[in-house]
Each structure stands twice: as C-alpha cells, then as structure tokens.
Image: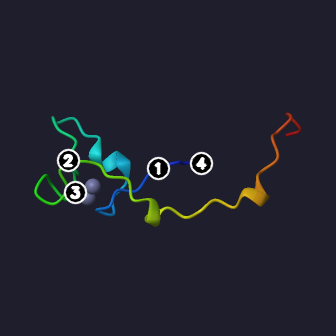
Amino acid sequence: MTDEHICVCGHSEAAHRHFRSGTDCGSCGAQRCSRFKRDKRAESPKPAESLPEPENGRL
Ligand SMILES: [Zn+2]
Ligand SMILES: [Zn+2]
C-alpha cells in the first residue's frame, strides 16, 4: 500500500527524491519543476466510509 503524493508536474514525490542535490523533479528537470509541489487536486479522495478493518492475526 503506497501513500505517495503527486506533484503538480504529474510525477510522484519519489521522482523528486534523487541522489543529486536539489529537490527538482527527476523526470521534468529543474526547468519545469524546481521543487516538489503537492497537487491536492490530483489526489483522489479517500472514501472514509470504507476503511479496511484492522487485521487481528486471523490469517
Ligand atoms: Zn514536480
Ligand atoms: Zn515531474
């Protein structure tokens, strides 16, 4: 289960985490995306009514 945030550039937050210095997008480059900016509109709202039940070690 992943909880990645999407940048306004359309790439995941992981794309902005690279070994080289800076927080620019690894796919777009510093010219298009100099830093990670969370795009809330791109995130699908989580249904609060369908929360998964916590596992109690039944498996
Ligand atoms: Zn970006
Ligand atoms: Zn990007």
Location of residue 9 in the rendering, given as x and y in whole percent from the top left corner: 28, 62
Q: Residue furthest left?
A: 31
Location of residue 29 in the rendering, given as x and y in whole percent from the top left corner: 15, 54
Callouts 2 and 1 close, C-beta under 8 Å? no
Task: Say whether disc 1 or disc 3 marks the residue closer to the N-terminus.
Answer: 1
- Residue at screen point 39% across, 59% down: 39
- Residue at screen point 10% across, 57% down: 31
Amino acid type, label 2:
Asp
Residue that badge 2 annotates: 24
Judging depth in this view, the residue of 12 and 8 nearest the camera is 8
Residue that badge 4 annotates: 1
Amino acid type, label 1:
Glu
Measure the alpha-carbon separation of dots 4 and 1: 9 Å
Q: Residue 4 carries which label?
A: 1
- Residue at screen point 28% across, 46% down: 16
Ligand 2, seen in the image, is in the quarter at bottom left
Location of residue 11 in the rendering, given as x and y in whole percent from the top left corner: 33, 58
Residue that badge 3 annotates: 27
